[in-house]
Image (tube, grey):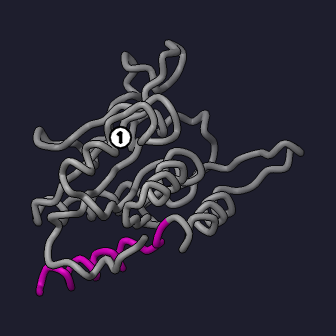
Amino acid sequence: MRNNFCGGSDLENKALIIVDVQKAFDDQKWGERNNPNAEENISKILEMWREKNGQVIYIKHMSDNPNSVFYPEHKGFEIKDIVEPKEEDTIITKKVNSSFIGTNLEELLIQNSITTVVITGLTTPHCVSTTTRMSGNLGFNTYLVSDATAAFGMTDHHNQYYNPDTIHDISLATLHDEFATILSTEQLIKDMSEILVQ
């Protein structure tokens, strides 16, 4: 079930979800990445969201493996400075790809009467995609911001390499119109402006 994002007059029933924008993804081990402006775009959305007193939910990935860049005692576990949380923001820690599995995210959204979520973060084919799919399946009005996420290149089971843009674009294509509405940062900002001038 999906409603028009422009249907409301404020952000009362909407939440911005920022998935895994952590310093771990600055590690060179991930290889080449597309959309270098993803974090900047998330920051723009976040700034406007805060101005309108919208609810912000951060998701952090955590590994129990001391050798992982996502291990809590490593710097990689930290959220990137460009989207630094504020004291009033909610931070949820997860251990799998989905932000809904093993967390209280769904309960939190329901308790706060959130019906629409705007998803941003890292990376497109993994935690962002999985979270988006579950959000849509659970009945939330789900928006994914295409240039506020990014992908790394990947090699498949035939040892064929796919560049980051291909991974990113195909990941978005598998979500579009079935699990979420895909839109750009510019489109989101425009739609939010239309909401808030009513």
Drawn side of residue 126 relative to residue 190, left or right:
right
- Magenta span: 180-198
- Quadrant of residue 188 within the rendered picture: bottom left
Label 1: how many Cα within 10 Å (few below 14, some 14–19, many 20+): many
Q: Position of residue 53 (x, y in %)?
A: 10, 60
Return the residue at label 1: 59
Residue occupying image coordinates x 39% and y 44%: 21
Q: Position of residue 187 (x, y in %)?
A: 36, 79
- Quadrant of residue 62 within the rendered picture: top left
* Quadrant where the image shows the C terminus: bottom left
Residue occupying image coordinates x 34% and y 45%: 106
The correct choice, above or below, for 72 with respect to 189 in the image is above
Drawn side of residue 133 relative to residue 44, left or right:
right
* Quadrant where the image shows the N terminus: bottom left
Residue occupying image coordinates x 62% and y 66%: 169
Drawn side of residue 159 relative to residue 195, left or right:
right
Q: Position of residue 55 (x, y in %)?
A: 18, 54
Q: Position of residue 47 (x, y in %)?
A: 19, 60
Q: Is residue 186 magenta?
A: yes
Q: What amino acid is labelled 1 in the image?
A: Ile
Q: Foreground: 109 or 95?
A: 109
**What secondary structure characterizes most of the magenta part?**
helix
The correct choice, above or below, for 131 with respect to 68 in the image is below
Drawn side of residue 58 relative to residue 95, left or right:
left
The correct choice, above or below, for 192 with respect to 69 in the image is below
Residue occupying image coordinates x 79% and y 50%: 161
Q: How many marks?
A: 1
Q: Is residue 43 magenta?
A: no
Most extreme residue toward the right is 158
Q: Secondary structure at mark 1?
A: strand
